[in-house]
Structure formats: C-alpha cells, structure tokens
C-alpha cells in the first residue's frame, strides 16, 4: 500500500505544507514572511503567528492540488511540534489536529531539527554513524546519529545560536535581515583585516557565539570612538571566517572520535558559502562522505518534516489530539510528548 504523508511546518517565519508519496516528494509549498519581518530587523513573533493563520489553509490546498492527492488518500499527517515560536507552532499544530480529527488520520509530531538533519536525505541516504552540524537561527548543536531516529547531542552553544550571532552582527553593521545572507555576500568582497577572538576555544564540543558577537560590537565601537570608519566588508569577512573556523575547528574532531561515515550540515546557516567550501576542503583527506543540503532545503520547509514523519510512521509514533506545541523541545526527547 502507498504511504502518503502530508506534513506541515510553521515554527518561525515560513508557512509550509509538503506531500511525500513513498520516497517521492510530490509537493513542497512554502510561503515566506521574510519581506514583512525585514522592516523590523528580525522576526516579530505576533506578526508571524497572524500570517501563519492567514496562509496555512492556502499552502495545504496548494500542496494537495500540486500533488494531485485528496485528503482521503493521505496515510498520516506530520507536523512540527517544536522547537520554535510558540504562537507560530500552534497554528500548524492546530491545523494538523483538525485534519487528523476530521479525516481520521494518525498525527505524527516531528522535531524541527530532526527535519533539518533529514533534509540531507534529499541528496543521499543517511549512513551511520554520522555527525550532523546543526546551525540555524535558533540552535547550534553537534549531533551524533548511530541509526535512524537516534540523536545524541555531544555539544551545543552555551548562549547565542550561530545564526543569531550573524543576524546581530549584521544589525550592528547596518545590514538588513536576515543578516547571515548579507554577511555572506560582503564576505566575498572583504579581507580578514580585523582580528577577532575565538571564545570557548577548548577541547569541548560546546560554543559561545555571544562572546564573538560582543567582540565585534566592542571593536566597532572602539573604531568609531577613534573617529574612524569601519570597513563593513572587512568586518563581515573577519566575523564570518572566525565564526565558521571556530565551528569547524571544534566539530570536525568528532568524526574520528565517533568513527563517522558521513558528516552533514543542517539548518539555515548551512547555506553559508564559506562553510560549504571549507567543510569539503577540511575533510578531503578523510574517508568520509560530506552531505550539503540543497539550498532550497536550508530554509524552513515541510518537505524535511515529511521526510522524518515517514520514518516515525514506520515506528507508529503517533500523538493524541491533546498534544501541545513545545517551543523548547530537546532533540534527544523527540519521543517524549
Ligand atoms: O534554519 P533557519 O531558517 O532558522 C531557524 O529555524 O532557526 O535559519 C535562519 C538563519 C538566520 O539566522 C540567517 O541569518 C541564517 O540562517 N542564514 C545564513 C545564511 N543564510 C541564512 N547565515 C550565514 N550565511 C548564510 N548564507
């Protein structure tokens, strides 16, 4: 029998619905709110929730039409339960619950970061053990997987996520949201002329990106107080190089320690051009497969949620209709809801 999963994602500023039939992605409709949040220099949670309410029905209808699937044919409904913005998560979850109740389909709660990790399966099947470098606007985690749906967090940021640091540094430099994209663009025009520290540069797998962000802010203020002008391109280059070098300096030793066969990037920051080229360069002499998610899959989307839901469906991981969203859901607790 065909396995048809309809999945919904609404954890931040993208409203999305996707449909996977067996292993084939039939539709992935994404409505992004970026242009609206740009005016505020970041995501405004209340506005995000309201826009999800307006868009959720539209993306579900479009996905069904594009896939040429009726709700009756759908096998199960996957939905992002967390982490993310609580109001935003609730919109997708309530829509999924309503469909589950009305059409009598199992409801599958999916962890957002598991989705980002499984986005790599659109490139190549996962091989274990693997190291997932999860780098987004809200999270920075190093995850070891020894088999499907087995997540061990070996390290994480102790303060800001790496994407958050990109966005905050961009704001200080007068760049628009999302800052990571702008910094990456200017990186190509600048040079590493500013010396920045690498906080928490120890042998642990943990990070402090807030320390690096503060170092940039202090440097900018110092230059301005001296009556000089900051070279934005050079500062963007220096920051990006320091942040990504630190990320990889600390992450890549895990490949040997955990005998990994694969290393993959996951989350919004995995679109970063220096990160993508540097990880290939630094692993060239290692016997390891590197998976870079396709660029369309680095931003939030429901296709990656549907991918995880297909595995959870096989394990019969279904939620009752009383389930609630969890904005701080830990990846290691993805079976506790
Ligand atoms: O995964 P995502 O959509 O957010 C969460 O789910 O948390 O990632 C968004 C983050 C933002 O911080 C954005 O600035 C960053 O990803 N980002 C980038 C790039 N493109 C997006 N950071 C660095 N370089 C990029 N090219």
Image: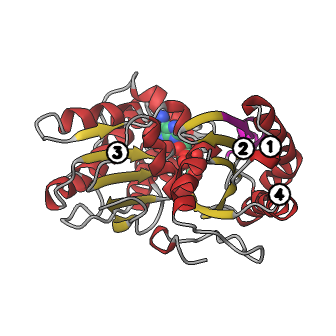
Q: Residue sitting at 53 percent across and 60 percent down?
A: 314
Tell me which numbered mark, 3 or 4, is placed earlier along the sequence. 4
* Mark 3: secondary structure: strand
Question: Hey, which quadrant is residue 337 in on the image?
Answer: bottom right
CA–CA distance in space, label 1 to label 4: 10 Å
Q: Does ligand 1 reach within 8 Å of label 2's beta carbon?
A: no
Residue identifier under label 2: 17
CA–CA distance in space, label 2 to label 3: 24 Å
Tell me which numbered mark, 1 or 4, is placed earlier along the sequence. 1
Extreme-top residue of the structure: 189
Question: Hey, which quadrant is residue 296 in on the image?
Answer: top right
Q: Position of residue 142 (x, y in %)?
A: 35, 59
Residue identifier under label 1: 60
Q: Residue 311 vs residue 200: left or right?
A: right
> Is 35 rendered above or below residue 51?
above
Q: Residue sitting at 31 percent across and 51 percent down?
A: 247
- The residue nearer to you, when weighing 122 against 4, is 4
Q: Position of residue 323 (x, y in %)?
A: 72, 75
Say few, some or many: other residues with alpha carbon within 10 Å of mark 2 (under 14 / 14 to 19 / 20 or more). Answer: many
CA–CA distance in space, label 4 to label 2: 13 Å
Residue identifier under label 4: 99
Tell me which numbered mark, 2 or 1, is placed earlier along the sequence. 2
Say few, some or many: other residues with alpha carbon within 10 Å of mark 4 (under 14 / 14 to 19 / 20 or more). Answer: some
Say few, some or many: other residues with alpha carbon within 10 Å of mark 3 (under 14 / 14 to 19 / 20 or more). Answer: many
- The residue nearer to you, when weighing 276 against 208, is 276
Tell me which numbered mark, 2 or 3, is placed earlier along the sequence. 2
Q: Is residue 225 visible?
A: no
């Amino acid at each position: 029998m065909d396995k048809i999963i309809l999945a919904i994602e609404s954890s931040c500023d993208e409203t999305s619905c996707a449909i996977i039939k067996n292993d084939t992605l039939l539709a992935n409709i994404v409505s992004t709110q970026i242009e609206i949040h740009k005016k505020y220099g970041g995501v405004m949670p209340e506005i995000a929730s309201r826009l999800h309410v307006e868009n959720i029905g539209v993306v579900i209808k479009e996905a069904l039409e594009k896939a040429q699937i009726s709700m009756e044919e759908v096998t199960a409904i996957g939905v992002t339960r967390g982490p993310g913005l609580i109001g935003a998560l609730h919109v997708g979850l309530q829509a999924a619950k309503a469909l589950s109740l009305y059409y009598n389909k199992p409801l599958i709660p999916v962890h957002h970061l598991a989705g980002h990790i499984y986005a790599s399966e659109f490139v190549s099947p996962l091989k274990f053990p693997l190291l997932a470098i999860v780098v987004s606007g809200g999270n920075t985690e190093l995850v070891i997987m020894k088999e499907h749906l087995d997540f061990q967090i070996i390290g994480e940021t102790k303060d800001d996520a790496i994407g958050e640091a990109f966005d905050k540094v961009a704001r200080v430099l007068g760049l628009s949201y999302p800052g990571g994209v702008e910094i990456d663009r200017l990186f190509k025009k600048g040079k590493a002329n500013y010396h920045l520290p690498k906080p928490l540069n120890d042998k642990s797998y943990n990070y402090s990106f807030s320390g690096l962000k503060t170092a940039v802010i202090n440097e900018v203020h110092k230059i301005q107080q001296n009556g000089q002008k900051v070279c934005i391109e050079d500062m963007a280059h220096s920051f990006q190089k320091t942040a990504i070098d630190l990320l990889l300096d600390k992450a890549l030793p895990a490949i040997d320690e955990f005998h990994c066969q694969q290393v993959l990037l996951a989350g919004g920051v995995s679109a970063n051009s220096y990160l993508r080229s540097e990880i290939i360069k630094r692993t060239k002499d290692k016997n390891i497969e590197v998976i870079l998610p396709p660029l369309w899959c680095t931003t939030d989307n429901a296709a990656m949620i549907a991918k995880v839901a297909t595995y959870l469906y096989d394990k019969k991981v279904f939620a009752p209709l009383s389930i609630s969203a969890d904005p701080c859901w830990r990846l290691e607790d993805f079976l506790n809801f």
